[in-house]
Amino acid sequence: MSLEPILPMSGHRPRAARLALDSRCDGDGTVVIAACGEIDMGTAPRLRDALTAALAGDSVRRVLLDMSGVTFLDSSGIAALIDAHHAAARGDRTVRLSNTCPFVTRVLEITGLAETLGLGAA
């Protein structure tokens, strides 16, 4: 049995992953970041930077990441969320997720991060 190498289709290029981030500050010390798109190794650094910037505010007590528009989450995205959680904890702050799609919720449940990141918490 011989295996032939798998070659990319002629002219086929992987599509660029996109992630849109929009943030706003609520008057109660909460920064809400809405994410829309894919969180993968190409976009996770942008998410990490947005979370870090949000946590840097003096009056910020909580960052709420609205993931209603997130269609994909890989290990790079999970690492960004874990890093943000640890950074927040060091500053006596929290990072919470909301509005995750079933796929993302399942990934976070399997990794044991759903409760840590406040899924289902108010």
Image (tube, rainbow, N blue to C red):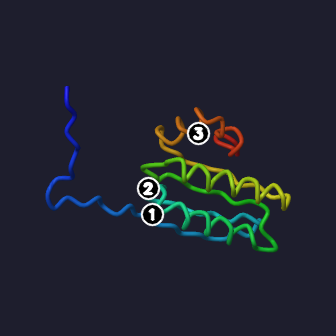
* Type of amino acid at the residue the image marks with label 2: Glu
**Image spot of residue 45 (x, y percent):** 56, 65
Residue at the front extreme, as displayed: 2
**Image spot of residue 64 (x, y percent):** 65, 57
**Picture quarter containing residue 3?**
top left
Residue to which mark 2 is pinned: 38
Compared to residue 57, the image places residue 77 above or below, namely above
Residues packed near mark 1 inside 10 Å, few (<14), some (14 to 19) or many (20 plus): some
Alpha carbon separation for disc pair 2 and 1: 6 Å
10 to the left or right of 45 = left
* Type of amino acid at the residue the image marks with label 1: Leu
Residue 108: give its label. 3
Alpha carbon separation for disc pair 2 and 3: 15 Å
Residue at point 53%, 53% (across, down)? 67
Residue at point 72%, 63% (across, down)? 30
Compared to residue 60, the image places residue 41 above or below, namely above
User: Circle 3 — which element?
Assistant: helix
Residue to which mark 1 is pinned: 19
Alpha carbon separation for disc pair 3 and 1: 19 Å
- Looking at marks 2 and 1 on the same chain, the residue that comes earlier in the sequence is marked by 1
**Image spot of residue 34 (x, y percent):** 54, 61
